[in-house]
Image (cartoon, helix red, strand yellow):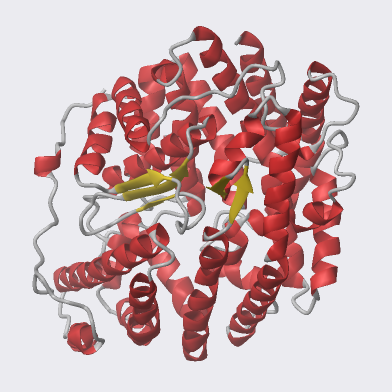
Amino acid sequence: MSNSSTTASQISKKARTFLPEGIQIDAWQKIENFYIELRDREILSAEALEGWMRDRSELQTVLQEEIGWKYIRMSCDTGNKKFEEDFNFFIEHIEPNTAPFENQLNIKLLSSPYLEQLDKEKYFIFIRGMQKQVEIFREENIPLFTELQIEEQKYAGITGVMTVQIQGDELPMPRAANLLKSNDRVLREEVFVKMAQRRNTDALVLDELFSKLVKLRNQIALNAGFSNFRDYMFAALGRFDYGIQDCMNFHVSISQNIIPLTNQFDTERKEAMHLDALKPWDMEVDPSGKPPLKPFETADELMDKCIACFHQIDPQLGEYMEIMKSMKHVDLDSRKGKAPGGYNYPLYETGVPFIFMNAAGSLRDVITMVHEGGHAVHSFLNRDLENIGFKNVPSEVAELASMSMELISMEYWQIFFPSEDELKRAKKQQLEGVINKLPWIAAIDKFQHWIYTNPEHGVEERREAWKNIFSEFGGNVLNWEGQEDVFSNTWQKQLHLYQVPFYYIEYGMAQLGAIAVWRNYKKNPQEGLRKYLDALALGYTKSIPAIYKAAGIDFNFSEEYVKELAQFVREEMEKI
């Protein structure tokens, strides 16, 4: 597939032409003059304007990587006060000063008489987004954004230290959750209840934190002239290619076409396990009574197997993973004091991203690894785009990269599961998970619509709203009797609600797209992979529908399309 090869020795930061190498950004004054120079520079031609854009992009790229490493270090060790202070310093003393300059530079570009002479097709998406940024910018929101970022990070500090005592061992939550795959139902219930009790210990703290976040976010929206934060975020996220009603249609599509299928999965599970009632602690175990899948023992083994898997998809993709390993741009194992979740952080200056996750030896970890690996591939494919704005892809595209890689890589999972029986189990569990994920996505998105169009709500109102929405998308087989408090607080596990509001329906849209990419790959692996990678290489130089079209798929979440893709997944499950 690949015509070229990239190795770790060939990866290096591009030489700077505007900022000096080695500059230490430990004070605003260190970079202020660069912003002033860009603001005051006289531009006398289209060529000079593009040169000015390159210099600005370099400055933004350096700052993006600076804050990136601070965030990575802090999330790898939430108990390290120095890392927390470094991150907070940047968002308290650097970003508030850059914000007004960035707005001035946006206006300078948009008002340039030479803007019309630039390649319209090349810059259309970039300029469209910038115009929206200028439209919603408000000086009075700068300190609110600073306060918001500080408050948002408290979620990781609260949840990252959560542990439970199981059979004499103190386990971080991701490792404890792994025991929910045990065939010992008594143990599973004990683990579930203890984890629920531990979360419940901080439920009020998390409620208070979230209420504060909602208040801050709503004020930002009001300051920018919007009636609510939901409408503000549709503008801030640059949702040019779909609107609020499309999200509502997505909710209906999932309710009508996916819930019947998940109910079927749950009924089959209940019957296979000979249960009178299917309980929340019965959802992770293999229903046939076989032991949990164990695809790897250590984080190093997970990385090496991922490299081998990606090599089989395409040698270049394997090399990308090797580069990350050799540069130590991965932190994969679960441990106390580490922030929850997983992410791929693009580091635009280096061009080599960083993968963070909490591996505990499960199939879920394999899926997370190849998911973040898909993001990483996207980062590598975008690394040489000339402007940082071209690399800032919308979530609907970013998640297409990651979720498609989950399914494409599945064709080579024998690396993780050499046993044919285990391989079939892994594939079936993954495909069932693909379907089961969609109702949760719809529920979280619908919940956010309710939260931010009812910003004055109280904690109890919010809890009731979640219970109603979760019931709508949770199916009618799973029995929560006796776990009502857990049911009403389940949303608190979703870090996106705390740290990246309204970033969630994109997973659903991208999941549908990923199924379509995988369907193409199954029909013609070479062509399917080529279109997928070509689409990712576009960065954000085309609209979302155009990028999906380049991948050979539709940007579509109608009832008919959802039903068609769900049926394809169901048929593939039956073939296993």
The mark total stands at 0
Vertical placement of 568 versus 471: above or below? above
Q: Position of residue 363 (x, y in %)?
A: 52, 29
Where is residue 415, by image quadrant? top left
State the residue in front, 417 or 386. 417
Would you say 333 lies left or right of 152 here? left
Picture quarter with the N terminus = top left
The x, y position of residue 58, in whole percent, is: 20, 68
Nearest the eye: 41 or 442: 442
- Residue positioned 56% across, 68% down in the render: 235
Tell me the quarter of the image containing the C terminus.
Answer: top right
Q: Is residue 260 above or below residue 232?
A: above
Residue 375: quadrant of the picture: top left
Q: Residue furthest front?
A: 168
Residue 140 image offset from top left, x and y in percent: 51, 91
Q: In this view of the protein, can residue 509 be seen by the observer?
A: no
Whether residue 92 is visible here, answered yes or no, is yes
- Quadrant housing residue 286: top right
Give the side of residue 14 with respect to residue 105, left or right: left
Q: Seen in the image, is 472 located left or right of residue 546? A: right
Residue at x 54% of width, y 36% of height: 513
Q: Looking at the picture, how far across and down is residue 331, in whole percent?
A: 35, 48
The residue depicted at 77 percent of the width and 33 percent of the height is: 257
